[in-house]
Amino acid sequence: MIRKADIILAVCLIAAGLAVSYAFSAGQETGQMAVISVGGREYASYSLLEDQVSTIDQNGHINKITIKGGHISMTFSDCANQNCVRQGEISDPSQSIVCLPNKVVVEIQGGSEEFDAITK
């Protein structure tokens, strides 16, 4: 049998969960710059505030990145597996896109970075 107190407790727990979820999501900032590395060396950096399309043509391989609305994605790659293209858009400093066959890495910098753990 469900009592009035059980319903009030359930509503309070749901409200508290939603409040905590909102507090964590509201504090996240998106990054400001996208840094592209090829073979471990910095190739270029682009502002995420300006929409643009750029082609990376290195070592006989082609990758195309698209920046739109503060997000960056790899929209074309001549690699075989296409994992980098299927990854979609990123915008947070904790995210990256990696094309292993072509040795291209897209990283977001700026904003506040999230840490998984801190050790001494």
Image (cartoon, rainbow, N blue to C red):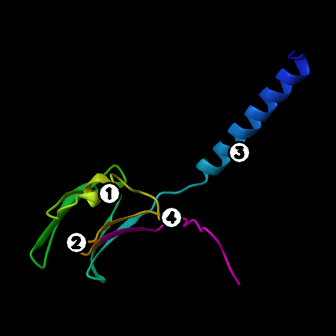
Taking the magenta stretch, the answer to whether it contains residue 39 is no
State the separation of the CA atoms marked 4 and 1: 15 Å
The magenta span reads 105-120
- The image position of residue 24, as x and y in percent, is 64, 51
Decide which of tag 4 and tag 1 comes sooner along the chain: 1
Nearer the observer: mark 2 or 3; the answer is: 2
> What amino acid is labelled 3 in the image?
Val
Measure the alpha-carbon separation of dots 4 and 3: 21 Å
How many numbered discs, if any? Answer: 4
The residue to which callout 2 is attached is: 101
Mark 4 vs mark 1: in front? 1
Main SS of the magenta part reads: loop
Q: Which mark is residue 111?
A: 4
Tag 4: amino acid:
Gly
Which labelled disc corresponds to residue 72?
Answer: 1
Secondary structure state at the residue bearing disc 2:
loop
Magenta stretch: residue 110 in it?
yes
Residue mark closest to the camera, 4 vs 3: 3
Mark 2 vs 3: CB contact within 8 A: no
Q: Secondary structure at mark 1?
A: strand
* Label 1 Cα neighbours within 10 Å, binned few <14 / some 14-19 / many ≥20: many
Q: Are marks 3 and 1 in contact (CB under 8 Å)?
A: no
Query: Considering only order in the chain, which callout, 3 or 4, is on the residue closer to the N terminus?
Result: 3
- Where residue 97 sits: x, y (%)? 34, 64
115 versus 42 height, above or below: above
Q: Closer to the observer: label 4 or label 2?
A: 2
Whether tag 1 and tag 2 are in contact, CB under 8 A, the answer is no
Q: Eyeballing the image, is 33 above or below 30?
A: below
**Residue at the image position 64 percent from the left and 71 percent from the top:** 117
The CA span between labels 2 and 3 is 41 Å
Disc number at residue 20? Answer: 3
Check disc 1 and give the amino acid type. Ile
